[in-house]
Amino acid sequence: MEVGFLGLGIMGKAMATNLLRHGFKVTVWNRTLSKCEELVQFGASIGQSPATVVKKCKYTIAMLSDPSAALSVVFDKDGVLDHINGKGYIDMSTVDADTSSKISEAIKAKGGDFLEAPVSGSKKPAEDGQLVVLAAGDKALYDEALPAFDILGKKSFFLGEVGNGAKMKLVVNMVMGSMMNAFSEGLTLAERSGLNPATLLDVLDLGAISNGMFKLKGPTMLQNSYSPAFPLKHQQKDMRLALALGDENAVSMPIAAAANEAFKKARSMGLGDLDFSAVHETYKAPDHSS
Ligand SMILES: NC(=O)C1=CN([C@@H]2O[C@H](COP(=O)(O)OP(=O)(O)OC[C@H]3O[C@@H](n4cnc5c(N)ncnc54)[C@H](OP(=O)(O)O)[C@@H]3O)[C@@H](O)[C@H]2O)C=CC1
Ligand SMILES: O=CC(=O)O
């Protein structure tokens, strides 16, 4: 089956590669076109624009950085809308429900089908086909895409109408971003109060709050090593969008708001392209010590 793939960043490259390895024919496009060449060795074809990819493929998947990128690829010149009539479009980027709805309405108006399908799981789960897919929108397109989702992920959820996938993903990442800040504070507090933070990792791992994120990120955070799996600028985007969802629903979110401030501070320190665990550095900054 020929599928399209738009966006070959950290996630998109791993996901498109997985599809190719499992026998899908994939035509890829990336804004920086040179990144497409890395996938040719795995059998990918290259499309010169989103429009040419959509024209060639039964359905096209996108994995783009943020709402503005997701909108641009659909609505700009040579974009997805040009050839969407009779085709499917699956946006797996993390965006807000409004962005997803705008894309959905435009695609439907042109005779296409739309599914949002953001994922939980980072670079390694993407490489290992262990993502969690949070889909919503056109159910027939979901059913058609399930063989691809089964390669990309370990579990897929169909959550109903467009917007529900985006909201679920934002809630999950709001919790994750808040936890990362509590964890960073804890590591810093352990160190400053004379404890061995490596021992704290062992203690945490043996108790009720043991989790994959602390286990994976803790050791590298203690080495001040933040090679990007999930870029901090994207985590801050997710906090911002989750807080907006909280505003819309009058949900007080003081913990998420504080976490967002820390991610913003990290961005202002030039850490946006590092892993989101680099927020740890903000807790070591001078105004966190007395
Ligand atoms: N990394 C992770 O752990 C996870 C990320 N996500 C989400 O997945 C999405 C992608 O993340 P990730 O792969 O890490 O991000 P990257 O920053 O590595 O990749 C972003 C991609 O978006 C493209 N892009 C950015 N702006 C535009 C634009 N204006 N027009 C067209 N293309 C654009 C980039 O193209 P170019 O190469 O030209 O810059 C690149 O292909 C994000 O929404 C993120 O929140 C979800 C789960 C996990
Ligand atoms: O969006 C990031 C993730 O790890 O999930």
Image: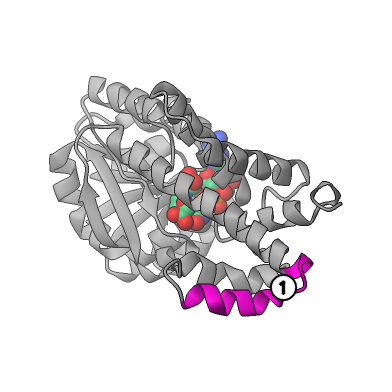
Q: Quadrant of the N terminus?
A: bottom left
**230 within the magenta span:** no
Residue 25: name its quadrant: bottom left
How many numbered marks does the figure carry? 1
Q: Amino acid at mark 1?
A: Gln
**201 within the magenta span:** yes
Magenta part, dominant SS = helix
Q: Position of residue 82 (x, y in %)?
A: 35, 27
Q: Residue at x 26, y 44 (%)?
A: 135
Residue underneath mark 1: 223
Front residue of this view, candidates 25 and 254: 254
Q: Position of residue 161 (x, y in %)?
A: 21, 32
Q: Residue furthest front?
A: 193
Q: Residue at x 16, y 49 (%)?
A: 144
Residue 151: name its quadrant: bottom left
Q: Residue at x 41, y 22 (%)?
A: 248
Q: Position of residue 195 (x, y in %)?
A: 72, 75
Task: Name above or below for residue 38 compared with residue 30.
Answer: below
